[in-house]
Image (spheres, rainbow, N blue to C red):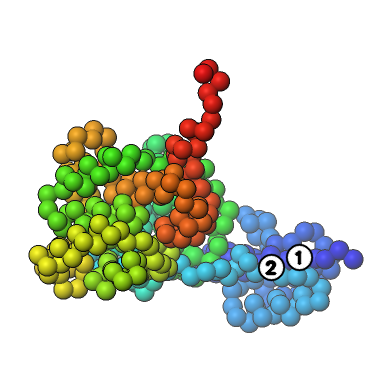
Amino acid sequence: MDKKFITLKHLLIDRQKCIGLQFYADKVIEALAGNLPGVQWSEDFRMVYVKNTTGNLDLIYKQFKGVAWVNSNYFFPKSDFGRENDSFDVEWFRKREISEGLKACPENYLAKLELKRYANNTVRTYVSCFEAFMNYFGERELSDLDENDVRLYLQKLIADNKSHSYINQAINAIKFYYEVVMGMPNRFYAIERPRREEKLPEVLVKEDVLSIINKTRNIKHRCIVSLLYSAGLRRNEVLCLKLNDIDGKRMLIKVRSGKGNRDRYTILSEKLLKDLRTYYLEWRPKNFLFESPTGDHYSAESIAKIVREAARRAGIRKRVTPHMLRHSFATHLLESGTDLRYIQVLLGHKSTKTTEIYTHVATNIFFTIKNPLD
């Protein structure tokens, strides 16, 4: 006998949370589902549903035990949304003035971002995207909006020539409200995302990187730029470094709570270690490795400005960003023969697929190919 399957789905019908039961036509399952308390048929979702209660959920498992396998993958979250551990502050969003006629982000949305400890950049992005979504529908209640409304909004973003990245951020912000704040995981599982743009990373030649480092204004700036390149750090990871994260004996740098909330180690340059010791004696930081005049860590824009100005003084015409130095670190390691798996560890990539993109820009691969014209 063929195994029967039922898939549970989150539904919001008449502002009420419901459990949807999706299955192929089967007389046995139909009969058992028909005996569930208060079961109804939804023409919009093309499935039967009952009210979302603990009792009804338990009853569904009991009702179909031994008859059909109940798939709950879409009903329960696979992992926790909160994954970042950077400093954050949602209080600013509570205190700011809102333009007349516009709606502000709901308090429960801000509270959940706060509880999940999302980083400031993520908070700003989510709040901005979600408020744009809310105000597009004017006075309509959020509980009245469904998948079709979300698709309509996404079509509007496409018509406005919004980037793939922005559209994905908008989807994440919307899903965060309905799936995390409202407690309905995977409700918008069927929303189509734009196809990811396969752009190659921008990379500098080693001579240009060294020129940028040499054109920094002082030892502090020199250390910051050197860290971005020689350790392959993200800008935020440099900002969060503390004094005891530099291990001069083992020649390692500990990166705490990097992207994905994962700790890792990366390599420490001997030249950089000498510069760091000189920097420490001159600047005497107390907590963070690089501190602002008030004792907090540096701002992200300050690091971007340091890199940008040093590149301009080095005579590099293209726009240079901190992340470009990280890309250059990975590419230069690959070109020197370092195993891709080691580079993955140093960068903190969860998957080798992410690291493999550097094989497309490593020039030593192309130098071994004989051009047919030659």
Q: Amino acid at mark 1?
A: Phe
333, 113: nearer the viewer: 333
Answer with mark 2 or mark 1, whichever residue precedes in sequence.
Answer: 1
Lateral position of residue 185 relative to residue 203, left or right: right
Lateral position of residue 50 relative to residue 341, left or right: right
Residue plotted at (36% across, 49% down): 329
Q: Is residue 274 visible?
A: yes
Residue plotted at (65% across, 60% down): 42
Lateral position of residue 284 relative to residue 153, left or right: left
Residue identified by numbered label 2:
71
Residue plotted at (46% across, 51% down): 338
Mark number displayed over residue 249? none
- The location of residue 275, given as percent across then percent down, is 19, 59
- The location of residue 121, given as percent across then percent down, is 31, 58
- The location of residue 31, given as percent across then percent down, is 81, 70
Residue identified by numbered label 1:
5
Q: Is residue 155 visible?
A: no
Q: Is the residue 63 above or below the residue 326 in the image?
A: below
The image quarter in which residue 9 lies: bottom right
Q: Secondary structure at mark 1?
A: strand
Q: Are marks 2 and 1 in contact (CB under 8 Å)?
A: yes
Q: Amino acid at mark 2?
A: Asn
